[in-house]
Image (tube, rainbow, N blue to C red):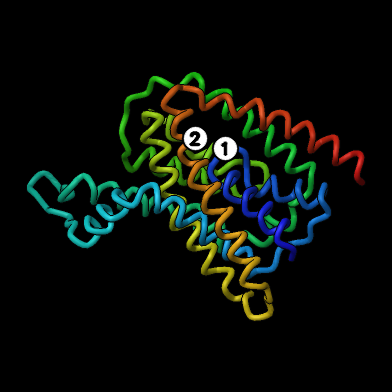
């Protein structure tokens, strides 16, 4: 794998993993247009690790507080029922609940869905769905709610649907949070924190294919650096758009890519 290709794939992974434009959809498009083959497993794992570290770099304080809350948290039984020992512990438990839908579907059906739906027509449909979601988010900019088990579960279900190429994980989860009453910034924070175990889970799951994967250290380092840097700045960029109530702006891009995917589907058959 040449250095230029490693850098390009790193940028694509870093930007599209967190911006609401679908990383899986862009990978399919890039493979069709640039005639890229599936990258070696070791390289793919390296990019996943880089994007996970990008989230950790942005949210390291919050993640550390949540880790402490997980080990110190208690479920307290009272006469009126039960309560959790802290808000942070409550947040951790909601994250765990939200992980379940995508975790189950990803574990049992990821390979099947990826192989069955990794074509430009499905990507076009997925990007169209993402476009609609982003446009609708405009009407939920003024929500002031917080994270709870109900809307956390809704976000988890939305994340499970994002396994289909073209449907953005960040787009669907942030929209689901906003639509269920969560303030936009809080929905985005929850979505990014939720991404860490998902990405690490994919990292671990793909380790089984590392044995027959041979990639040079320079290529791995190139992909890692470009993926980490672009991932870090894409998170910052998206948070800025959400603060300004401009999350829906990404719909113009995904709509364009949906049309492009459809054109490519009919012209490259």
| Above or below, 157 relative to 256 | below
**Residue that mark 2 sits on:** 238
Spot occupied by residue 255 in the image (x, y as percentages of width and height): 70, 29
In the drawing, what numbered circle is on residue 20? 1
- Residue at (76, 48) in percent of width and height: 30
**Which residue appears farthest toward the left when viewing the image?**
79
Instruction: Sort mark 2 into few (<14), some (14-19) or many (20+) by Cα contacts within 10 Å.
Output: many
For this view, does 17 lie left or right of residue 145? right
Q: Earlier in the sequence, mark 1 or mark 2?
A: 1
For this view, does 29 lie left or right of residue 173? right
- Residue at (19, 56) in percent of width and height: 73
Spot occupied by residue 5 in the image (x, y as percentages of width and height): 73, 57
Q: Closer to the camera, 165 or 46?
A: 46
Spot occupied by residue 152 in the image (x, y as percentages of width and height): 38, 42
| Above or below, 110 relative to 188 | below
3D distance between C-alphas at marks 1 and 2: 8 Å
Q: Closer to the camera, 38 or 198?
A: 38
- Residue at (41, 26) in percent of width and height: 243
In the drawing, what numbered circle is on residue 218? none
Spot occupied by residue 81 in the image (x, y as percentages of width and height): 14, 47
Q: Given contact means CB atoms under 8 Å apart, are the residues at marks 1 and 2 in contact?
A: yes
Q: Closer to the camera, 119 or 32?
A: 32
- Residue at (46, 46) in percent of width and height: 156
Q: Nearer the viewer, mark 1 or mark 2?
A: 2
| Above or below, 139 relative to 20 | above
Secondary structure under badge 2? helix
In the picture, the quarter occupied by the N terminus is bottom right
The number of numbered discs placed on residues in the rendered structure image is: 2
Instruction: Sort mark 1 into few (<14), some (14-19) or many (20+) by Cα contacts within 10 Å.
Output: many
Secondary structure under badge 1? loop
Q: Closer to the camera, 80 or 164?
A: 164
């Amino acid at each position: 794998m040449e250095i230029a290709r490693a850098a390009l794939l790193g940028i694509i992974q870093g930007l599209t993993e967190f911006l609401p434009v679908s990383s899986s959809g862009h990978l399919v498009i890039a493979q069709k247009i640039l005639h890229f083959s599936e990258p070696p497993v070791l390289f793919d794992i390296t990019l996943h690790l880089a994007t996970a570290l990008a989230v950790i770099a942005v949210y390291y304080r919050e993640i550390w507080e949540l880790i402490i809350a997980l080990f110190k948290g208690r479920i307290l039984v009272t006469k009126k029922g039960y309560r959790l020992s802290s808000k942070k512990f409550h947040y951790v438990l909601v994250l765990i609940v939200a992980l379940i839908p995508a975790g189950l579907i990803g574990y049992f059906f990821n390979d099947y869905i990826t192989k069955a739906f990794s074509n430009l027509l499905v990507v076009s449909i997925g990007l169209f769905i993402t476009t609609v979601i982003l446009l609708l988010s405009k009407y939920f900019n003024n929500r002031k709610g917080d994270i709870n088990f109900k809307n956390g579960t809704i976000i988890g279900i939305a994340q499970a649907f994002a396994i289909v190429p073209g449907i953005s994980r960040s787009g669907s989860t942030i929209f689901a949070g906003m639509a269920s009453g969560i303030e936009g910034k809080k929905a985005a924070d929850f979505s990014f924190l939720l991404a860490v175990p998902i990405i690490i889970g994919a990292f671990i799951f793909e380790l089984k294919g590392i044995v027959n994967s041979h990639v040079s250290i320079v290529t791995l380092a190139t992909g890692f650096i470009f993926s980490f840097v672009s991932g870090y700045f894409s998170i910052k960029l998206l948070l800025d758009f959400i603060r300004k109530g401009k999350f829906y702006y990404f719909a113009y891009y995904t709509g364009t890519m949906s049309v492009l995917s459809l054109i490519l589907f009919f012209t490259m058959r």
